Every structure is written in C-alpha cells, then in structure tokens.
Image (tube, rainbow, N blue to C red):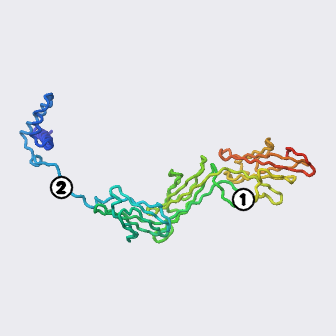
Amino acid sequence: MRSPNVLTYAVASFCICVISLWGICAGSTQSVFAQAATSSASSTPQQDELEALLRQLTATSSIPDYLKNAKPPTEADIPELPDEFKQAPLNVTLNPEYPAAFQDVVASVDSYSADMDRSTITWTLNGKVIQQGIGAKTFRFKAGKNGSYTNLGVSIIFNGVESKKTISITPATVDLIWQADSYVPPFYKGKALFSHQSNLKIVAIPNIFTKDGTLIPASKLIYRWKLGKEFVAAVSGVGKNIVTFSDKIPVNEKEISVEVSTADASVKTLGQIFVRSVGTNPVAYQDAPLTGISYEKALPNTFLLADSEMKLVIEPYFFSVKTRDSDSLYYGWSLNGKAVPDVSRSSIVFKVPEAEKGSAQVDVELRQPSKVFQTNANSLMINFISPGNTGIGQKSLF
C-alpha cells in the first residue's frame, strides 16, 4: 500500500498542474483567485472547500518555472513540414480505362489538395517529355501494340512543391463469343438466337501477353464476370473463361461484361457485350415426298393448296429444345376452331376432298410446360380447289 505522504504529494502535484494551466489561460494564478473572490456569493460549501484546498496547496508547493513562464506557441515555433508531406496526391484516369492496341487514349489528372488550373503540369511517355503547360490537365496519346509496356508519367508544380505519379499501361483485349441453347433447323445459315428463358453460354478469349511477347494461357488469368451491374462471384475466378447464364425473367437486353487480369494485376482488360432476347417463332414449311422440307421458302399465312395432299411441318425456332419433336415441347393442332385429336407432333398431313373448293383455318400452338415464356402459335389459312367444282365454303381437309 502507498504511504499517505506519497498519496498526498500526488494529489498536490495534480492540483498544482490544474492551477498552473488555469493561471496561464487567465494571465496569472493571482488573477484567477481574484476572480474567484469576486464571484457570486451563491457558491456552495463544496466549492469553498475546494478553493481553500487549492490556496493551501499553492501556498505550500512550488510551481516549476517552465509552467510559470509557459506561453502559447507562435507560428514561428511550428516546424516546417518536409517536402514529401507537402506533395499533393494525384489521381490519374484513362479513357478508355483499359486501352486496346493502338487505341487513342485520353489521360486526365486531378487532385483534391492542389489547384490544377494554376499548376504547371508535365506529361511524359517512357521518361520523355511530351506535353507541358499551366493547367494542362488532359493528355492524348496512342497506346502501343499488344503486350507492350508504356510508362505514363505526370508531374505538377503548385506553390513551389512538385508532385509526381507514374502508371504502367499494357494494351490487351478480350473477345466474347456467345451461344444460345435455342433450336434452329438443320443447315440454317443464321445464328440460334437468345430467347426468353433460354441459356446463354459465353466464352472469353483473352489476348494478354507477357513482357517478352508470350501469350498468357486463358487458364492462368483471373476473370470477374458481371451481369448488368451485379458482380457474379459464383462464376468468377482463375481460369473461368466460360460461363452460362439463364434468362429466368424475360428482359429485352442483357449486358454481360468480364474483367480479365494477370495474377499480379499488372495487366487488365475489359470485355462487354449486349445480347437482346427474342421471342420464340414457330414457322410452317411444306414437306414434299420427293424434295423434302422446303426450307428455302416458309409458308405464308394464306396460301393456295393445288395438290390433293400436303404434309405441313412446324419448325420451333428459338425454343430451348434439341429437336423439333422433343418430348418437352407440346404441339396443339386445330382445324376451323376444333382440336385435332391424336396429333401431338411437329407435322400433319392434309388431304383435299374430291370435287371440293373452299378454305380451312389451321392453328397450331407450341409451348414448353417447364418454361412458361416459351409459348407461341402460328395460324394458316389454306385455300384449296378440286377440278370441275365451283362451290365455295369451309370444308374439312381430313
């Protein structure tokens, strides 16, 4: 346990410090007590007791000279900061952010602690001064070839203090190729389009080189995929250059982007595509016995049937199926508003009644129960004529 004398001395020292600081602020310790003596008579006994204790302590204790003579610091007493602490932090931005080979680039510099319009700004490429001037905040240049390394430097002088920053630019590109799992008929010259609720497969093909000009394998790079503005962590990572997205909710257009970088993040590039979704489209064709399906000419909504018999085929463009007669795809046929029984596939045969002339309305509905937005229909008006007949009316073709 501490002795009473030690404890008393500690309390006394603390009170002396309080009194000294109070006296410095008011001009002197004596003026403090003079103000206390002329203060309001409504002071409490506790305040009187504390004041008496303070007077006793100041009378019996000595105040160090360095506290008696203490003065507030002046501006001259504050040491000057070294130049490295005066430098303004610089922010350099590129447009485009990830330049491709031989692409025109605009660099901009800014700082929150320097007036750029009154600063002397110098731009360099690989150590060579290219542009200099007061307020020269932007700099235009052309990127090098793929795999080349360019050091872009900028320095500013403001209020006599110079601030510098250097960034390394390595042109790189990434190509994005997409493929939908929708259906198109054999030998179709177009692309299988991305339809509502279909799956979209995307392959990233990066062109990133090392300093010695060697192409870095796609499996060694890091990929960060985004669907719209949302980062998709589940499909991102090392070597993940192939992803598949599903269109659960129909939208007119999907924005898909990927940032590809090296393991040390020294080289980065960005790829972006916009894929517009389309609706499914059942198209009707004639299937002739000798020539097969006439893919070169789809049947119009209204046509004349001059033969005694015709096989009609529906091709389910952009449905998510492998074949047109997939078990997951339902066909519902009707003739003149009445359902045709026992026909649930993509083709149907029509026969013209003898000595008849007329027309018939043929409708077909296609749908996938597991994909509610992959539903569509086609409607055909078939006019038919038999030789030697002049009657007109709606007749059955079966």
The structure residue drawn at horizontal position 70% and vertical position 51%, both measured from the top left corner, is: 281
Relative placement, left or right, of 124 versus 275 is: left
Can residue 3 be seen in the rendering of this structure? no
The vertical placement of 153 against 335, above or below, is below
Q: Residues within 10 Å of mark 2 (few under 14, many from 20)?
A: few
Tell which of 99 and 238 is nearer to you: 99
Q: Position of residue 174 (x, y in %)?
A: 53, 62
Q: Callout 1, which amino acid?
A: Pro
Q: Nearer the viewer, residue 51 or 31?
A: 31
N-terminal of the two: label 2 or label 1?
2
Q: Looking at the image, do the residues carrying marks 2 and 1 touch, with CB atoms under 8 Å apart?
A: no
- The answer to whether residue 48 is seen in the rendering is yes
Location of mark 1 (residue): 186
Instruction: Count how many numbered circles sit on residues in the image.
Output: 2
Q: Secondary structure at mark 1?
A: loop
Q: Amino acid at mark 2?
A: Ala
Disc on res. 76: 2
Residue 384 placed where, x, y %? Answer: 85, 50
Query: Which one is nearer the viewer's eye here, 47 or 157?
Result: 157
Residue that appears at 86% across and 47% down? 358
Q: Is residue 144 left or right of residue 178?
A: left
Give the alpha-carbon distance from disc 2 to disc 1, as whole Å. 88 Å
| In the image: residue 119, left or right of residue 170 | left
In the rendered image, which quarter contains the N terminus?
top left
Q: Secondary structure at mark 2?
A: helix
